[in-house]
Amino acid sequence: MGDRTTDPAAETATPAPEPATATATATATATATALTVTVTTPSGGGRGRSGRLTAGLAAGLVLLAFASAGVGAYEIPLGDVIGSVQHHLGLGGAALDRVGESVLWNVRLPRVALALLVGASLGCAGALMQGVFGNPLAEPGVIGISAGAAVGAVAAIGLGLGFLGNWTVTACAFTAGLVTVSAVYLLSRTGGRTEVVTLVLTGIAVNAFAGALIGLFVFFADSGQVNQITFWQLGSLAQATWPKVLAVLPCAAAGLVLAPCYARRLDLLSLGERSARHLGVDVERLRLALIVVVALLTAAAVAVAGVITFVGLLVPHLLRMANGPGHRFLVPGSALAGAAVLLAGDLAARTAAAPAELPLGVLTALIGSPFFFWLLRRTRRRQGGWA
């Protein structure tokens, strides 16, 4: 038997992997990399900054609430406001005179409470929408909630409906907002899935259709109804009462409690839909759940306050600039900051042109639009575009 000769190069060469093995290896590597990025524990400085920002927002919100309760055509000193609140809570303090008690508890505090709920709902909804769509330009109006609620309110006013008394407009606005969101979701769903682009385009079409319906109702309305429609669309908290606060409270509380539960999955979704699926996130179920939460928050807010813009768009931007994109802080922080922004806006609306009152939606748009343009320019200068 002769000796068999071997090629040294053949013995040392590594066999080429099979295509399926190479694909699996690449997928596993990408998943491991994404997982490493996701579960990296934030530094102590990051946690400390989040805690300081949360504490600052909460403290500022409390001070702003007491100040807003005292400032107005009938001035109530801050100490008297605190004393009256303590008295009603059984913690000491002293009651005000009859007029002061009536102004504080029947006019000011319902308005403050409604501003807190509406602002927190809009700010939190904006943060959720931007996380779901992966786009900092997203806000609740993108999927037609605000426009749908406006159609319901305008229809109730234009048709002279009154089957629920003073609650008719609010109930119609809330119901129409939820119906509109459901229609947008169902129309954009194909093959058991919804794509972000399809949701946005469907929302644009529905918004345009809602605008046409509003114009039609305005055309057939009489002058008194036109004035009422215009006032509602401009947005205001002037009609705040304790029953309205209680009406908005269940939806706002449910949405604000549920929203932080999705923070981790939103962080995973920010890595991209494919990576999120590899890490165990049911993207379709997550998107549906968050759209429902956003619908509850926004429809309830718009139903009692009218159309108020830019709160849900700008507040998450400001918090990202201050503390980064992590949703564990961003979602509850946006609720606190949104409440503070709307409370400050309402205070300015009541006092800037006293004794007249500016429409709150107009004021937020006047301040928010140039500020948003500044944010756009700033981000483009630093990052070359929206990141």
Image (tube, rainbow, N blue to C red):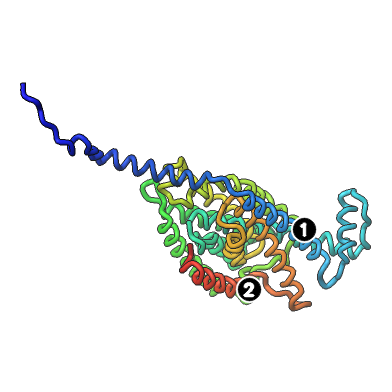
Going by the numbered disc 1, the residue's amino acid type is Val
Most extreme residue toward the top is 1
Judging from the image, what secondary structure is the residue with disc 2 in? helix
**228 above or below 128?**
below
Residue at 72 percent across and 58 percent down: it is: 56
Most extreme residue toward the front is 3
Tell me the CA gap for discs 1 and 2.
23 Å
Asked if residue 228 can be seen in this view, the reply is: no
Residue at 41 percent across and 51 percent down: it is: 194
Q: Nearer the viewer, residue 147 or 216?
A: 147
Residue at 57 percent across and 57 percent down: it is: 324
Nearest to N terminus: mark 1 or mark 2: 1
Going by the numbered disc 2, the residue's amino acid type is Ile
Asked if residue 361 can be seen in this view, the reply is: yes
> In the drawing, what numbered circle is on residue 62?
1
Judging from the image, what secondary structure is the residue with disc 1 in? helix
- Crowding near pointer 1: few (<14 within 10 Å), some, many (20+)? few
On the image, numbered disc 2 is attached to which residue?
367
Q: Nearer the viewer, residue 281 or 173?
A: 281
**2 above or below 320?**
above
Residue 158 lies, in percent from the top left, at 59, 68
In the picture provided, is 96 more to the left or to the right than 325?
Answer: right
Quarter-of-image position of residue 338: bottom right
**101 above or below 228?**
above
Q: Nearer the viewer, residue 42 or 24?
A: 42
> In the drawing, what numbered circle is on residue 301?
none
